[in-house]
Image: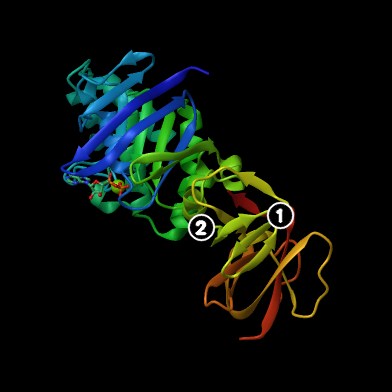
Amino acid sequence: MSAALQLMNVSKSYGDLKALDRIELALPDDAYISLLGPSGSGKTTLLRVIAGFEEPEQGAILFGGKRIDHIAPHNRGIGFVFQNFALFPHLSVAENIAFGLVNRELNPVTDAASVKARVRDIISLVGLTGLEDRAVTQISGGQRQRVALARTLVTEPKMVLLDEPLGALDANLRSRMRTELRAIRERCGVTFLHVTGSESEALAMGDTVLVLDRGHIAQSAHSDLLYNRPASPAVARFLNCYNLFSGSVAGDVFVSPTGRFALGGFRQPASQPAYAIRYDRVDIREQNAPVLQGEVRLEGNFVASEYSGAAINSFFALDDGRVFEVESHLSRSAPQTYVEKGRYALVWKREDALVFA
Ligand code: ADP
Ligand code: MG
């Protein structure tokens, strides 16, 4: 694999705050990469350092095998789609898109016919045909997002950085634009590095997902692997699909304040011991239902259920007051109803748990 973009030992501080702490990463050509992290973890800073808007104190940035640290942002061949779109309100859709092409320092395109042809192609690529002459104040949020992307793509970058590109859109549009963005990227064949604070967006969109935790890369993995094998309790927490327990391993048992869990699953070396069971690996049963060989069981009182598309998430209060979450897929069984405050058994297979030890 040839790495399109490589960061080696890159750090960036603001005063005493280490916004990026010795970042190491290598991104492939022609791929969709998600960068997931909570607010303040350094996502925007990382994009700004890659684009050249911020200078790191140390480290090297290579793009296509060449160092780009000291190259001006507009000469790096890297496009940036800003969080708030940053369109020119007084210009039309086509004029916004043409702007970067006509005004760039390196190889500006001045021939009106070729500008027109390039803009037309890119407008069709992002699905804005027919809206060329509209004012950008008179199109929808999703369409503005496409203009922002088109304005970057028209300059033919070799890589595109997108800072929370779907953050400003409503939920419905957001899920449609996920599919759109992936399709657009496939058509132009460049790497997209897509920043998001949403774990479901990161997993759905990225071939590879990078997880940023307080300025360092906590994990970089294929989305399936990340989902099934988070590298640390912190990553499992960000993914927001695991019930996590702290405690310690004693032989074949994980001892936590909530209960003792017989071990049998995958053990992931980690500095902090923790036990993790995914929301969708838990079965909800009547309190007195029998437990089978190899199963682990907890009891909890039903609090509420929440429907979301093809799944129901049910919440149970454990005896220590913690909330335990279970995700049930409607395709697997008819929706169940539970008695409010009723006591249920929460059961999973030993080998389905992840143990950090
Ligand atoms: P994210 O995009 O993941 O929310 P940022 O990269 O914006 O995170 O910020 C990372 C950290 O750096 C935060 O603690 C933020 O307050 C701080 N930070 C970002 N930009 C600046 C700046 N220009 N001056 C001082 N601190 C900053
Ligand atoms: Mg940000």
Measured from the top left, where is residue 115 in percent x and y?
A: 27, 23
Find residue 252 and name its label. 1
Q: Tell me residue 148's x, y (percent).
A: 31, 40
Please rate how many residues cluster around mark 2, counting C-alpha atoms within 10 Å: few if below 14, some from 14 to 19, many from 20: some
Depth check, front residue: 74 or 208: 208
Q: Is residue 246 left or right of residue 330?
A: left
Residue at 37% from the left image edge and 39% from the top image edge = 216
The amino acid type found where label 2 is placed reads Asn
Using the rendered image of the protein, determine whether residue 319 is visible from the camera's viewpoint.
yes
Extreme-front residue of the structure:
250
Which of 204 and 37 lies nearest the eye of the viewer? Answer: 37
Q: Earlier in the sequence, mark 2 or mark 1?
A: 2
Front residue of 7/197: it is 7
Pick the front one: 131 or 338: 338
Image quadrant in which you'd find residue 229: top right
Disc on res. 240: 2
